[in-house]
Image: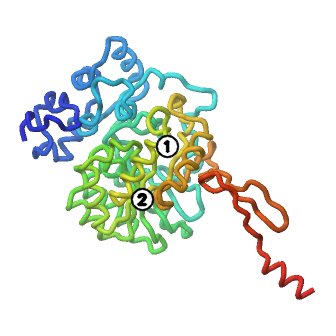
Amino acid sequence: MGLTEIEGKDMNKKVFEYFKTAPGSPEWNDWHWQYRHRITEIEELSRIINLSDAEKQEIASCLHRFRMAVTPYYASLMDPEDPKDPIRLQAVPSILEMHTMDCERSDPLNEEGDSPVPNIVHRYPDRVLFLTTRQCAMYCRHCTRRRIVGEEDYAITRSEIDAALSYIERTKEVRDVLISGGDPLTLGDDKLEYILSGIRKISHVETIRIGSRVPVSMPMRITPELLSMIRKYQPVWLNTHFNHPREVTEEAVRACGAIVDAGIPVGNQSVLLRGINDDTDVMRDLLLKLIKARVRPYYLYQCDMSEGLGHFRTDVSEGIRIIRELTGTISGYAIPRFVIDLPGGGGKVPLNPDYIVSEDADHILLENFEGRLYDYPKDRFAKQQKEVKA
């Protein structure tokens, strides 16, 4: 496909001009090519989006602290003219990241405090988080784990994997292992299989989960060979991370469809981000597109208190409002749970709109999604049974 054939497509044509390629070409569809050609320098970035001298200076300041990497694929989704483009905001460094609020921490969820051995976080009784790599296809600007992810392209060694597996094996209450990082799907098939096979050999582990943003940032990674390998270690679940409806492209839908067709359920965990998806219509569009792609909305996270993320965080009431406005307007299975992962390692807490208007001994007064009031009787059968027995 030549460059002239992409006219009219909603893609950033500067990306294809810069890399001298085209969508659909063999190299474009090669995830190794995408990973090798990630945009990491300001001058590269300025060739695909319009940047003023002031913006270049601000990005340079940010890169002294937090690294940048953007796949050509994800860059092709950016509007090169709009500094407030929701795709661009998730990938391009901002001078606002240099401001650390008093409430922010490098490790806001105290993962290091809940790490009994390197690369394992054991917070909940029956499950552990297994951090297999520090690298991602793209370094999201809102990353919770930015204290370690992106510092260098580093995957843990075979001996480090074995040490983590040893902890899981001797900790009998663990029945669920979440493989994360970084992004574990940036690992080669052989190394990922070593991890999966090692976990599956542990008799008390029932479920394996993989957390990956690759279907969003580099969907060509989802190859038949990868899926054929993962299928050997069922049950395996995959949670991904779409934040905006424009990320749900034809390529991303194909990747998610291939995962589901391989018998691997796919869920989605969005983060509520100011100026990106803190709008009910935008969120509804995203959720409906995900359902159509056979991706089940799972969580909507309040943005964590990692350093430099204050400009992304909304008030908690905004998330509750969005869930309330979605309720009754789309199917219940399309609505994620709005949660806060509590600072200091307290774990996830769901936050729900309150539909109880009043309550007495016999009745609960409830408000539905339209604002109408309904009386619901309490358990009169149990009350009558007590009266009969008396």
Residue 73 image point, x, y percent: 24, 39
Tag in front: 2 or 1: 1
Earlier along the polypeptide chain: callout 2 or callout 1? 1
Q: Under tag 1, what secondary structure?
A: helix
Residue name at image x 42 percent, y 61 percent: 209
Q: Residue type at mark 2?
A: Arg
Across and down, in percent, residue 174 comes to: 53, 66
Q: Is residue 112 visible?
A: no
> Residue 243 vs residue 357: left or right?
left
Mark seen at residue 113:
none
Asked if 211 appears above or below 33 in the picture, the reply is below
Of residue 255 and residue 4, the one placed in the foreground of this image is 4
Q: Which residue is mark 1?
A: 280
Residue 306 vs residue 6: left or right?
right
Q: Position of residue 20 (x, y in %)?
A: 10, 32
Quadrant in which the N terminus appears: top left
Specify the quadrant that holds the C terminus: bottom right
Q: Residues within 10 Å of mark 1 (few under 14, many from 20)?
A: some
Residue drawn at (33%, 39%) of the image: 138
Specify the quadrant of the image occupied by residue 267: bottom left
Report the residue that reaches farthest toward the bottom: 389
Q: Residues within 10 Å of mark 2 (few under 14, many from 20)?
A: many
Q: Secondary structure at mark 2?
A: strand
- Residue 296 image label: 2
Q: Position of residue 186 (x, y in %)?
A: 30, 48
Q: Badges 2 and 1: C-beta atoms under 8 Å apart?
A: no
